[in-house]
Image (cartoon, grey):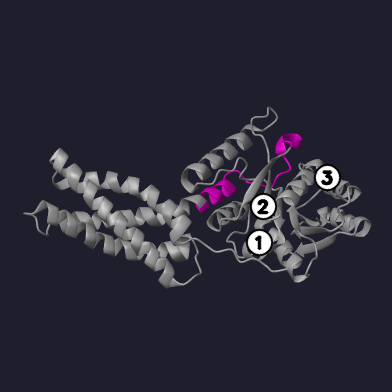
């Protein structure tokens, strides 16, 4: 198996040349560097890498972010019709050892259709507290809310088979959130992945990183939270519609009152929810017909489950007015979490578009 190394970098120092040198010494000669808008004082490492080690250097005139740098490299790789089997993305700050890169290559040889993630151990004593807390929190959110069990969600060491790169070019995000979106895309398209344990190296408390803890963490969590914003708004629309309808229609018949109110409110909220989920949340580009059919099958099932539970609980607790609305809020909150996972894994599930050859 042969692989192309991709290294995005901004304002590098001598560590970048240390990375390139160790790679070439171990047989990695196809290396793409992306200069992501470095200033004049930090251009020499790129020149030396190109002159002395034969690296291909791609340049951004201004800083566009790590996500855009990776896309630039992926696009160049595809357009150049590279004959290698895929790419390995590597950080240019010397925190990924050649030994770990080789471990990822070996794992990819064993599972050529898998994306290989080089994952660090955040229980090691040398891990800075902000990195440990941030990664553990993100991993918990991914596992709990997205059903994606990854121990290191921010790893930059990833071996990617070439057939997945065209799809990855379409992923939303320009900066560090792009790598998070990449993992979510893997989930939606059922792209298999394998974790490889790597050394946990932090040089000078990770002082060389360009990751901004507040700005970039917000973007990463926005990526996750946006999946739920549409459903929350829709739930509020649904709850408001239910409360309004139940106050005026068939008040003398509690069963009919709840049923009509549930159906009417769900029709209004579902139209909003479907449009938002398809276009803004899951960014699904497939046909409306298939996704809408699946969506409304799920919607009808949810509606009857909601109706049944609210009816039973309202009878049990003899609830009226505000209490009945509160019961519905609790019921729909539980259904909400289940609904999102089903939409992610079935309704708006994306198909893999693999390159041939």
Residue 205, magenta (yes or no): yes
- Quarter holding residue 77: bottom right
- The quarter of the image holding the C terminus is bottom right
Residue at the location (58% across, 35% down)? 133
Q: Position of residue 315 (x, y in %)?
A: 14, 43
Q: For the residues carrying marks 2 and 3, which lies nearer the camera in this image?
A: 2
Asked whether residue 9 is in view, the answer is no
> Tag 1's secondary structure?
helix
First along the sequence among labels 3 and 1: 3
Residue 172, magenta (yes or no): no
Numbered tag placed on residue 319 in the rendering: none
Numbered tag placed on residue 115 in the rendering: 2
Q: How crowded is the residue under tag 1: few (<14 C-alpha within 10 Å), some, or many (20+)?
A: some
Which residue in the protein does label 1 denote?
Answer: 164
**What's the distance in space between the residues labelled 3 and 1, CA to CA?**
30 Å
| Residue farthest to the front, as pictured | 110
Residues at discs 1 and 2 in contact (Cβ within 8 Å): yes
Residue at the location (62% across, 32% down)? 129
Which residue in the protein does label 3 denote?
Answer: 15
Q: Is residue 207 left or right of residue 148?
A: right
Residue at the location (78% across, 46% down)? 101
Q: Which residues are magenta?
A: 199-223
Q: Position of residue 127 (x, y in %)?
A: 67, 32
> Tag 3's secondary structure?
helix
């Amino acid at each position: 198996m042969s692989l192309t190394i991709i290294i995005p970098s901004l304002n590098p120092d001598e560590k970048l040349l240390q990375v390139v040198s160790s790679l070439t010494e171990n047989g990695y000669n196809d290396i793409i560097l992306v200069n992501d808008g470095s200033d004049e004082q930090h251009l020499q490492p790129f020149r030396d890498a190109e002159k002395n080690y034969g690296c291909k250097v791609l340049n951004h005139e201004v800083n566009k972010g790590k996500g855009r740098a990776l896309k630039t490299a992926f696009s160049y790789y595809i357009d150049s019709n590279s004959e290698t089997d895929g790419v390995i993305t590597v950080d240019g700050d010397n925190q990924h050892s050649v030994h770990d890169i080789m471990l990822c290559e070996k794992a990819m040889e064993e599972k050529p259709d898998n994306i290989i993630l080089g994952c660090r151990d955040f229980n090691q004593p040398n891990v800075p507290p902000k990195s440990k807390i941030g990664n553990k929190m993100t991993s918990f959110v991914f596992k709990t809310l997205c059903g994606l069990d990854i121990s290191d969600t921010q790893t930059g060491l990833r071996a990617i088979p070439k057939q997945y790169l065209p799809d990855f070019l379409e992923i939303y995000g320009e900066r560090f959130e792009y790598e998070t979106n990449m993992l979510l895309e893997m989930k939606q398209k059922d792209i298999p992945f394998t974790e490889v344990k790597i050394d946990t190296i932090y040089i000078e408390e990770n002082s060389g990183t360009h990751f901004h803890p507040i700005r970039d963490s917000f973007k990463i969590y926005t990526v996750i939270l946006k999946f739920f914003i549409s459903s929350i708004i829709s739930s509020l629309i649904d709850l408001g519609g239910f409360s309004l309808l139940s106050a005026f229609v068939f008040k003398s018949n509690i069963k009919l009152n709840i049923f009509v109110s549930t159906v009417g409110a769900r029709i209004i909220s579902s139209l909003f929810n479907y449009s938002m989920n398809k276009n803004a949340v899951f960014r699904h580009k497939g046909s409306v017909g298939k996704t809408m059919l699946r969506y409304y099958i799920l919607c009808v099932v949810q509606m009857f489950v909601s109706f049944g539970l609210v009816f039973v609980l309202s009878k049990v607790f003899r609830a009226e007015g505000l209490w009945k609305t509160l019961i519905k809020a609790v019921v729909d909150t539980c259904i909400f979490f289940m609904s999102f996972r089903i939409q992610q894994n079935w309704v708006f599930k994306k198909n893999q578009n693999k390159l041939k050859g």
